[in-house]
Amino acid sequence: MSKRNFDILKVAMDTLGARIRTARKAKGWTLDALASKCGLSTGFLSQVERDLTTLSIVSLSAICHALNVPIETMVSSSSPFGEAPSAVTRADQQLHIQIGGSPISYRYLTGQLPDVPVEELLIAEFPPGCDQQNSSHEGQELGYVLRGSLVLTVQGEQISLNTGDSYRVEASQSHGYHTSESEGANVLMAVTQRFIEIPPQTPRPRGGKEPS
């Protein structure tokens, strides 16, 4: 990782400290042992594990390197030691970082993803009262709620999503969407395998006029 000054603006500390502690204990290390391997003080690490302080990306990188756990896995909303068929990252749990003195900040909507390319990027517009169930298709589906709220159902489990929340679904699993009668939702979706067949458009004649 670059040695530029990376700063975490916000991170889900309620899970991060516990995950660091779990990974450390899985190796049978004391706090002193981890401190000696990552170059941070024992007192600081104790505060981190108890969620009493925040971490810079540099410090988090040093801890993850010592534990041999990728940063993406450590901050993921899903289990750090195993992949689930679906995962949700709440708006207030997304990792925000800023690189050096750049005015641009970046927000991580998902944790670690399988090594597969995104094939389509689209916005799904769910009207009020939408009730689509038992949908399935190949690949992974990632979504970010741009507006409104909806209920995502994955294999019978219902998950409420609001503006700013994001999710990942193993799309071959049965899943569906439901919106209330009073409010719809717009969701930015990325899929790793095309599942919508777009009909060919009738070519326009020169001059841009529709054929008669």
Image (cartoon, grey):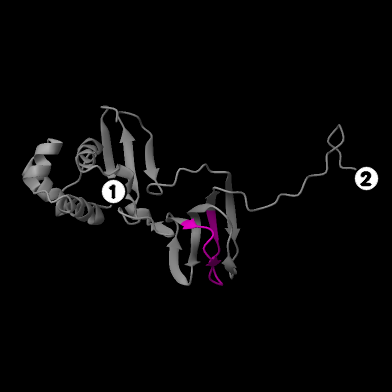
Q: Residue at x 11, y 49 (%)?
A: 47
Q: Residue at x 49, y 43 (%)?
A: 116
Q: Residues within 10 Å of mark 1 (few under 14, many from 20)?
A: many
Tell me the number on the disc at residue 74.
1
Residue furthest out toward the right: 212
Which stretch is magenta?
Answer: 169-187
Residue 163 at x, y = what percent? 45, 57
Q: Is there any visible trace of residue 52 in the rendered image?
A: no
Q: Nearer the viewer, residue 211 or 121?
A: 121
Badge 1 marks a residue whose secondary structure is helix
Is label 2 or label 1 in front? 1
* 204 sits left or right of 102 in the view: right
N-term mark: 2 or 1: 1
Q: Amino acid at mark 1?
A: Met
Badge 2 marks a residue whose secondary structure is loop
* 70 sits left or right of 66 in the view: right
Residue 106 higher or lower than 137, as above or below:
above
Residue 115's quadrant in the figure? Answer: top left
- The tally of labels here is 2
Does 129 appear in magenta? Answer: no
Say which residue label 2 marks. Answer: 212
Q: Residue at x 44, y 66 (%)?
A: 160
Does 183 appear in magenta? Answer: yes
Residue 129 at x, y = what percent? 59, 71
**What is the spatial separation of the Cα atoms under label 2 and label 1, in whole angstroms?**
60 Å
Q: Amino acid at mark 2?
A: Ser
Residue 160 higher or lower than 83, as above or below:
below
Tell me the number on the disc at residue 39.
none
